Image (tube, rainbow, N blue to C red):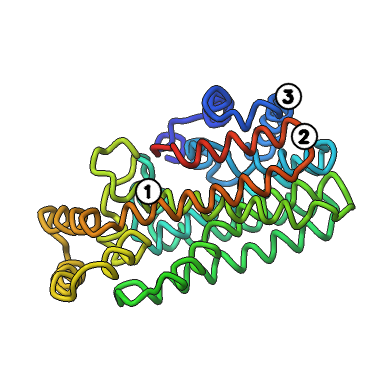
Amino acid sequence: MRRVIFIYSIHGLLIYALKMIKTLKIFNSIKKELKQFETLFDSYVEGLEFSDYLKGAKGKMLRPALTMVGAKIGGEIKEESLWAAISVELMHNATLVHDDVVDNADMRRDKPTFKHFYGDKQAVLYGDYLLAKSLDCVIRTGKLSIVNTIAHTTGEMSIGEIEQLEQSGTLETSEDEYFEIIYKKTATLFVCSLLVGYYSSTSEDALEETVKTVAYNLGMAFQVKDDLLDYDTSGSSGKVYGNDIREKKMTLPLISALRQANEADAQEIKKMILLPEIPDRELLKIISFVETNGGLEYTEMVLEKYLNQAREAIATLPEGDSKSGLNYLCKYLGERKK
């Protein structure tokens, strides 16, 4: 059954990631190491339960790539760096499996979710299983600093999801609360990815704070851009537009628009959002309201602020391929369509 449902191969997943080298120049400095990662990832994942799900969960592999770039900032990519990268990717997949249960999502990026095929209970347990395997990989690095970082990040991401769930449906999330939530949900994993790579190749802490600053701003920019893509009605993002609105999630475009609009219009929009089921016509009205009241424009400005702060921190890193790759990533995060 498992092998009938999931038709993709491990090689399909990682060949896709390697193809991204052509479009994501952050990978240019780690082509050889990506092949090493592919070999080790293949070997490890093949023995996991429900491995076919991981085989079909195609992604850009940004977080493992960041881990290896972080290792190059500190020195050279080692076997410990590869195990740290696998740990990060498994942890990321675990959180996605859990998120799909929380969000009641049957599709993610045009692909059926684990929850869709196996239900909520099995999805929760499978997410737990992936977290356990992530910890198995991080132990293989033999570095307490990496173990501590992975453990701290797992906790922060969970708290971020809880805080967003508590805010969902209240329409009272402030801008500061929004930033705190997206830091815990998303940016903290970017920080973890780059930092554990750095720790895997050096015991020096000279660049530790710079690495954190770079990763923090990249992670914040990633989530702000993702929230902008929720308002893309063209379908080019691969997301179902308006999904955050349907789930009553207060993201920055909506928070900003409600703040800028007159009280009567804002109350009307809130009533639409709080409908048990939002019809497509009302959904498009909400999206139009956000655009008309400057929500998208303001969010674009915030996105550029984070990218500029990332660029400023990157500029202080030693010259090399990692520095160039991170600058390319800034460009990609600002321009990405999905």
Examine the image and state in which quarter residue 281 appears: bottom left
Would you name the residue on which mark 2 appears?
A: 319
Q: Secondary structure at mark 1?
A: helix
Of 208 and 138, which appears nearest the observer? 208
Gap between marks 2 and 3, in whole Å? 20 Å
Q: Secondary structure at mark 3?
A: helix
Residue 20 in percent (x, y) is at 54, 27
Gap between marks 2 and 1, in whole Å? 47 Å
Would you name the residue on which mark 1 appears?
A: 117
Q: Is residue 206 left or right of residue 185?
A: right
Residue 45 in percent (x, y) is at 63, 40
Q: Is residue 147 left or right of residue 241?
A: right
Residue density around tag 1, few if under 14, some if 14–19, many if 20 or more, within 10 Å: some
Residue density around tag 2, few if under 14, some if 14–19, many if 20 or more, within 10 Å: few
- If you read the primary sequence from the N terminus, does the residue marked by circle 2 or circle 3 appear first? 3
Q: Mark 1 belongs to which amino acid?
A: Phe
Would you name the residue on which mark 3 appears?
A: 32
> Which of labels 3 and 1 is toward the front?
3
Give the number of the disc on residue 273. none
Residue 60 in percent (x, y) is at 53, 36
Of 289 and 85, which appears nearest the observer? 289
Q: Is residue 71 left or right of residue 55?
A: right
